[in-house]
Image: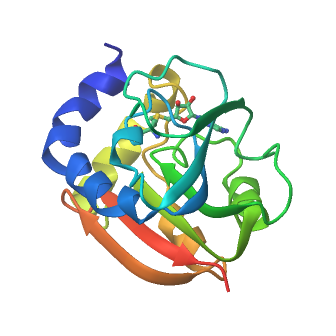
Amino acid sequence: MNIYDLFMSPLEKRFLTKIRKNIIPRALGNVLEIGYGTGVNFQYYNLATVKSVSALDTKSTPAVKIKAELPLKFFEGRAEDLPFLDESFDTVVETLVFCSVKNLDNAMNEVLRVLKPGGIFIFMDHVLPEKKSMASLFKATNTVWPKIAGGCNLTREPYKLIEASGLVIEQSGRSGHDIFRWGIGRKA
Ligand SMILES: C[S@@+](CC[C@H](N)C(=O)[O-])C[C@H]1O[C@@H](n2cnc3c(N)ncnc32)[C@H](O)[C@@H]1O
């Protein structure tokens, strides 16, 4: 277990699983999941509503939590330069990836590009907390954190970029002392 997993493991049990169970079953049609990691979200897709899941990560890692019946296809690539045609997905999913993409603006533009009109973007990120004492702690930790946690940044606020992107935010929430923000945005 690396330092990131060690840090996230109690948070996963306490907060993240609940959020995943709430948002991932909302995916429908042809789905793109960006940064699938070990495939922790795969078990939460609703087989009745999902046609296919294209799972993309920077490197192909063996996914450990695959629902046997899930129509999965694996791709190597980066969020900032998605290897897919415009308007090819009904749903795009991103959980805990926008903290570590190198160029967040490009990644968000790519999400908007590959989403069909009317499609939804499902997201969940850890963010810079609003509370000043917590924010200071996160900022101080972030001076070393990206170097030891695979490029993960503790000071980002992706929900602000997502909210400003033109997507219509249909649902959103926060949890874990405001460390986690999630939401579902629809492309007009
Ligand atoms: C912290 S893990 C999150 C895994 C999973 N999505 C989850 O919710 O637990 C971050 C994942 O994002 C991937 N990643 C990092 N930068 C990326 C990028 N630019 N494009 C696509 N995936 C990226 C990493 O390889 C890693 O698998």
- 110 sits to left or right of 63: right
Look at the image and tell me whether residue 3 can be seen. yes
Q: Outermost residue, top direction?
A: 1
Give how far across and how far down residue 145 sits, in percent.
Answer: 43, 30
Q: Outermost residue, right direction?
A: 85
Q: How is the image coloured?
A: rainbow
- Ligand 1 occupies quarter: top right
Quarter-of-image position of residue 68: top left
Q: Quarter of the image containing the C terminus?
A: bottom right
Q: Is residue 29 above or below residue 61?
A: below
Q: Is residue 94 above or below residue 160?
A: above
Please name whichever residue, 181 or 111, is drawn nearer the observer in this view of the structure.
111
Identify the residue at horizontal 66%, vertical 54% (top origin): 104
Give how far across and how far down residue 20 sits, in percent.
Answer: 31, 52
Quarter-of-image position of residue 148: top left
Identify the residue at horizontal 40%, vertical 47% (top origin): 139
Look at the image and tell me whether residue 127 can be seen. no
- 114 sits to left or right of 25: right
Please name whichever residue, 91 or 98, is drawn nearer the observer in this view of the structure.
91
Identify the residue at horizontal 57%, vertical 54% (top origin): 51
Q: Quarter of the image containing the N terminus?
A: top left
- 158 sits to left or right of 102: left
Please name whichever residue, 37 or 5, is drawn nearer the observer in this view of the structure.
37
